[in-house]
Amino acid sequence: MSQTTESAARDDLPRPVLEAPRRRRIHRAWTVAAVAFVTIIGGAAFNALPGLLIDPLHEEFRWSRGEIGLAVSFDMALYGLTAPFAAALMDRFGIRRVVVVALSAVAAGALASVWMTAAWQLMIYWGLLVGLGTGAMAMSFSATVTNRWFVARRGLVTGILTAAGASGQLVFLPLCAWIVDRHGWRPASVTVALAALLVVPFVVLLMRDHPADVGAAPYGGEFVAKPAPARGAASRTVRVLVDAARTGPFWLLAGSFAICGASTNGLIRTHFVPSAHDHHMPITAAASLLAVIGIFDIIGTVFSGWLTDRFDARRLLAVYYALRGVSLLFLPILMQATVEPPMVFFIVFYGLDWVATVPPTLALCREQYGEDSAIVFGWVLASHQVGAALVAFLGGVARDHFGSYDVVWYSAGALCAMAALMALMIRRVKGLPADVVAG
């Protein structure tokens, strides 16, 4: 065979096809989670205000701290009671529509408060409008996003989205404290309203209700068709509550989470700044300490989500509550006019534990209640906010009566010990696959 013929034969042989390496695209679920993170930050901006404005409102309008605390407690209670209905409304009307309306309500309430002159107006603007708006973007929003868009890494994503509230605190507390100190409380309220409105375009453009809307499968799972809108949102929410209330784990979860709310939002977020101010600490310094809590809250919550994917959620909760209670018992002796190292240690420690309870609590709801877990968690969150509301109000009354917050700190420490015991009493679901328990 000639050389030319051999060359032609070689040309006829099949050759491997060389393809250009494909770039690995980021799963759409992470984009939705990022938008949810930013949304929670914008909606949580208002949470930076109440503790900063107790003293300014008291000085300008001569309202008692109990009256102001009552408005804050109304906001917190509505926040919690709205959450389970919001989860059902998202099933009916979609995540995007509900969140846009909620952000608008927060902006309207914060902006309208600029013109208030009576305590009842504070109840309407802070309590009703802001309470309903922030409640619709509560942790049940995080649960809905996580359950729809993720099969793998649910604990981690829950921790990240929970940390968004702390991120909002980190961003807005120092800013609002500076504005209140230099320009008064009204510009700070306007700032919060603008923050909520600025998030709306991100939600409209990038948020999607279900993976099937973009032809994708949930992260770590298989493609599922988008279910039809669930009608009867309110009746379903109540029905889920009635069914869950017949079980022991629900009351243990709700009771322990009520103490969680009492010892965080109701106590530290509302009364830490005025308590520190009682000891002549500047308001900007006290607000900065709360912002530092926000930094370590992010670390602690994300790490807690990682731990929840790997360890028994009940034991994690017991450890978190026990450590929180011990730290609160030491707080009265740490209050001084200046920020000393022991106070910094408390802030770091408390920040790591702040909402580290959320990922294991949500995991236990998922383990116990399956497809209804987001709504059940909404009711558990309602108990969290009722606990926060009671302490926000009673803390102000105690300060008016006793002249200090010491009795409030000690009482909260004892309650946390009870929460640790309640967590250990929650029974495990027998025969549940390990991946479902971990989430």
Image: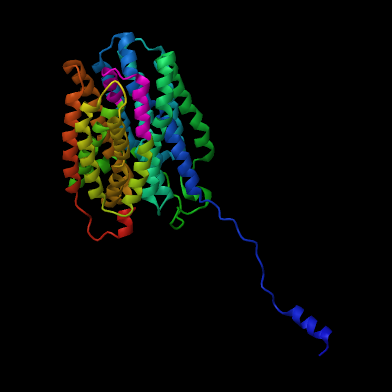
The residue lying toward the viewer, choosing from 368 and 266, is 266
Asked whether, in this view, residue 7 is left or right of residue 224, the answer is: right
How far from the left and from the top, in percent, is residue 53?
34, 18
In the image, the segment drawn in magenta is 270-294
Above or below, 372 against 349 in this view is below
Above or below, 337 against 44 in this view is above
Can residue 81 be seen by looking at this rendering? Answer: no
Q: Residue at x 34, y 9 (%)?
A: 60
Dominant SS type (magenta): helix
The residue lying toward the viewer, choosing from 185 and 236, is 185
The residue lying toward the viewer, choosing from 364 and 88, is 364
How far from the left and from the top, in percent, is residue 65?
25, 16
Q: Residue at x 34, y 29 (%)?
A: 290
Asked whether, in this view, residue 231 is left or right of residue 315, the answer is: right
218 in magenta:
no
Above or below, 318 against 77 in this view is below
User: Where on the picture, by quarter, is residue 192?
Assistant: top left
Asked whether, in this view, residue 368 is left or right of residue 212, the answer is: left
Q: Where does the N terminus fall, quadrant-wise?
A: bottom right
